[in-house]
Image (tube, rainbow, N blue to C red):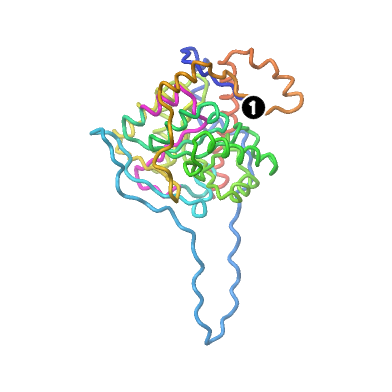
Amino acid sequence: MSRFVWTFALAAGLAIAVSSAQAEEPAKEQIQAMTSAQPAVAEPAAKQEPKAQDAAPQAAPEQPKKAEPTKTALACAHPGALGTSRTITVAPDAFPHIGTMQYRESLPLEDHEVVITFDDGPLPPYTDRVLDALDAECVKVTYFIVGQMARAYPDTLRRIYNAGHVIGTHSMHHPFSMGRMDDEQLTREIDGGIVAVKAAIGDDRAVAPFFRVPGLARSRQVEAFAASRSLAVWSADEVADDWFHGIKPAQIVERAMRRIEAKGHRGVLLLHDIHPATAMAVPMLLKELKANGYKIVQAIPAGDRPATVPERTPEQIAAARSQGWPRVIKASLKGHHAHKHAHAASETDDGFIGKLAGKKKHAVASAYEINEIFNR
């Protein structure tokens, strides 16, 4: 992304104004601008040499671990809540690429099982409202965190983790051009984002080796770079268009449910916790999932993780915020673009959010046809 500006007050005027007709565009018609590179093809197995008649039999090659299911439901203190039915442990060597919008494989979910993920945060107060809704239903999810947002809101990030959610990463600055980046640029964005999130959360072990490409702008080079860092690259099985201008919470819920149903009553759902419409939609979505017999599964990383990370007291957080929240989180700009956007801080917050949403719509939507291109 060439530029990020977020609204950090409790301002009621953050709602994004665009015609509802735009929000009603069919997902199929959005497909225009994603890279069309083919996914990496597995190397053929090496030809084995003939064995001597009396040679000892050779051991079969070691296979990568698959996701290890935990059938026990996570504890829930709220009777009648949707809950989290089980977890699956996902290792990058077993699942290097996840999500049928772009890849051949997704997580091994059973009928009526859904994994919920959130991108782009944290951003209070909307992330806080999403967390409250998830807690009310004892639902555990995965967050893909932008490095700059973690740096701006470390307390919210730590609250996410301590609520039992998994923390993955989503680059440092959320560029939509990642599919065209070289290794030096990828190092700054992918490694830089991981470093920033680890620093903000306070414990390296609290960050999972899960990465989602901004705008789902995948490429072989991005995937190879991620593999060199032992990262699982997440796409998704369904999106709900919650970044669309003017989309209403009920529309987000309807699109999420319709697309989950169309994908065999299961899938990895991608949402964004930085939008007010999403914050309002989450309680409705969880209610709808429960009413239709769905169960929530949480994907967790292998290895030991801390039970919690240190949090500041509400009084300490309030004192820090009283010093003033940053209104602009600067993204990297190149050449004449930096000069062109030098006046950006004076523009309206709604205008900035609108630009971000427009770029995301243009980039992510093409993943619907990628399903046809890559999954033959």
Secondary structure category for the residue under label 1: loop
Residue 121 included in the magenta stretch of the image: yes
**Circle count:** 1
Which quarter of the figure has residue 135? top left
Residue 154 located left or right of residue 175? left
Say if residue 177 shows up in the picture: yes
Does 221 sit above or below residue 243? below
Nearest the viewer among 317 and 124 is: 317
- Local packing at callout 1 (Cα closer than 10 Å; few below 14, some 14-19, many 20+) is some
- The relative height of residue 313 versus residue 55 in the rendered view (above or below) is above
The question of residue 226 being in magenta is answered with no
Q: Type of residue at label 1? A: Ala
Left or right of residue 289, residue 310 in this image: right
Q: List x then y, in percent, for residue 346.
A: 64, 12
What residue is rendered at 65% in x and 41% in y?
186
Whether residue 251 is visible to the viewer of this picture, yes or no, is no
Expressed as whole percent of the image width and height from the top left, the position of residue 26 reads 50, 29
The residue at the far bottom in this view is 54
Q: Is residue 35 above or below residue 71?
A: above
Which region shows up in magenta? 107-132
Which of the 4 image quarters holds residue 117?
top left
Q: What residue would you read off at disc 1?
A: 331
Q: Quadrant of residue 336?
A: top right
Q: Position of residue 342 (x, y in %)?
A: 70, 18
Q: Residue at x 46, y 28 (%)?
A: 156
> Image quadrant for the N terminus?
top right
